[in-house]
Image (cartoon, rainbow, N blue to C red):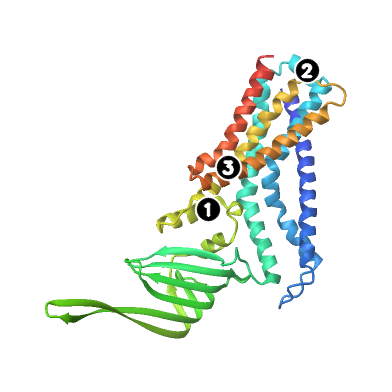
């Protein structure tokens, strides 16, 4: 059995590595072509964005592409090996030597477990770090990290009041730019606004806002007699405006939370997503989008197991000369459809307000049902 395991594992691993390398080379080329438009632009204190910076930037994007493409590579590589073994009658010899369907499935699931661990490590540790390094490199020449037109919006509930915070950009040296803080009381009335062009994180759970402009709204009730026995209440508001070179604002919003809000959810680490979801829920904010991404991060590595299950029935098909290319093409289409369906269900779940774990797990469950059906029909019944 060790000889059979060594044969199949060696063939599958080399085939998956070749497919993954081809995909990564293709995405590397596309990313590099996309970066050519920025060459020679964004000249600031650090210099000009050159071809060496573009090459380093697209290289740092490779781990995230590997994480996204690993299940597809596992499927295509496994299908190619299984189909080739069937075409050359090698798998028939292995079957007569005692490699039954369940033993073959167990063999491939062991290989799939290795890619589950690899996918988790790449997606949760390597890819987030390289993605952040890539964004910081780009920000050194574009001088900012931002999202959308207005930046990141965060909310925090403190003892008596609620705060809504807007951070437009995050600089390469971890400074926040274009900071606006809106304070509301328990009745929903605005209490103060604070604006600062630059803010930095302090080590004692506070932000230090430089050149801050603050407006405080004070209201008081006065009673005026309109006539005998009648009274009318009028609300008078006062606005107190101050400007200070340094304003210290106590908050529990950490640098990691600001970074999370300024990056795409799918490119965050699982623990960062979990902490950010807890922060949103504690402040009565919707976390549906981030919950779906969290569960996708949980279930996505497990799709490697589904892919090797889909590949096993190809070893029991009968091939004519040259027919293997069509089945490999079918494997490519299945992998692409899984990738598209995984993204589509994330958007549908967010729009239709589905349970986050259900929206994330549905594509994997569908393809697992298909693989088990194919295994039962082509392997067990025939």
User: Sequence order check: which comes first, mark 3 or mark 2?
Assistant: 2
User: Mark 3 and mark 2: span between their CA atoms?
Assistant: 39 Å
Whether residue 106 is situated above or below residue 200 in the rendered picture: above
Depth order, front residue of 206/97: 206
Query: Toward which corner of the image does residue 78 lie, by quadrant?
Result: top right
Residue 92 tag number: 2
For this view, does 191 lie left or right of residue 15? left
Query: Toward which corner of the image does residue 204 lie, by quadrant?
Result: bottom left
Residue 183 tag number: none
Residue 301 image offset from top left, x and y in percent: 61, 41
Depth order, front residue of 315/96: 315
Q: Closer to the camera: disc 3 or disc 2?
A: 3
Whether residue 351 is situated above or below residue 152 in the rendered picture: above
Residue shown at the point (67%, 57%) measured from the top left: 130
Q: Quadrant of the C terminus?
A: top right
User: Badges 3 and 2: C-beta atoms under 8 Å apart?
Assistant: no
Whether residue 301 is situated above or below residue 317 in the rendered picture: below
Q: What residue occupies the far left of the structure in this picture?
A: 229
Depth order, front residue of 5/262: 262
Residue shown at the point (69%, 42%) measured from the top left: 70
Residue 95 image offset from top left, x and y in percent: 74, 17
Residue 259 image offset from top left, x and y in percent: 56, 62
Residue 318 image offset from top left, x and y in percent: 79, 19
> In what element is the residue under mark 2?
helix
User: Badges 1 and 3: C-beta atoms under 8 Å apart?
Assistant: no
> In what element is the residue under mark 1?
helix
Q: Which residue is mark 3?
A: 345
Q: Which residue is mark 1?
A: 273
User: Sequence order check: which comes first, mark 2 or mark 1?
Assistant: 2
> In what element is the residue under mark 3?
helix
């Amino acid at each position: 059995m060790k000889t059979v395991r060594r044969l199949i594992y060696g063939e599958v691993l080399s085939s998956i590595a070749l497919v993954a390398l081809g995909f990564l080379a293709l995405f590397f080329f596309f990313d590099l072509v996309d970066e050519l438009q920025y060459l020679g632009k964004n000249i600031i204190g650090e210099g000009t964005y050159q071809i060496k910076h573009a090459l380093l930037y697209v290289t740092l994007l490779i781990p995230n592409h590997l994480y996204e493409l690993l299940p597809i590579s596992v499927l295509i590589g496994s299908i190619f090996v299984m189909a080739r073994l069937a075409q050359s009658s090698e798998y028939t010899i292995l079957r007569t030597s005692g490699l039954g369907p369940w033993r073959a499935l167990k063999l491939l699931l062991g290989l799939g477990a290795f890619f589950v661990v690899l996918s988790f490590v790449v997606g949760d540790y390597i890819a987030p770090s390289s993605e952040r390094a890539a964004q910081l490199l780009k920000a050194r020449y574009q001088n900012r990290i931002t999202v959308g037109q207005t930046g990141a919006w965060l909310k925090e509930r403190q003892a008596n009041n609620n705060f809504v915070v807007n951070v437009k950009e995050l600089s390469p040296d971890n400074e926040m730019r274009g900071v606006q803080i809106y304070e509301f009381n328990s009745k929903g009335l605005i209490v103060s606004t604070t604006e600062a062009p630059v803010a930095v994180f302090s080590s004692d759970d506070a932000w230090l806002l430089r050149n801050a402009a603050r407006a405080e709204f004070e209201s008081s009730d006065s009673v005026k007699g309109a006539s005998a026995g009648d009274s009318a209440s009028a609300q008078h508001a006062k606005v107190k405006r101050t400007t200070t070179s340094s304003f210290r604002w106590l908050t529990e919003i950490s640098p990691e939370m600001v970074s999370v809000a300024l990056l795409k959810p799918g490119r965050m680490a699982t623990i960062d997503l979990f902490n950010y979801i807890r922060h949103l829920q504690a402040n009565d904010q919707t976390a549906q989008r981030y919950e779906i991404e969290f569960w996708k991060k949980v279930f996505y590595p497990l799709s490697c197991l589904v892919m090797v299950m889909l590949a096993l029935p190809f070893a029991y098909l009968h091939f004519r000369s040259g027919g293997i290319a069509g089945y490999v093409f079918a494997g490519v289409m299945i992998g692409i459809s899984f990738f598209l369906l995984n993204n589509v269900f994330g958007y549908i779940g967010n729009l239709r307000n589905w349970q986050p774990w259900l929206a994330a797990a549905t594509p994997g469950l569908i393809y697992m049902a298909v693989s088990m059906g194919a295994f039962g029909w082509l392997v067990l019944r025939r």
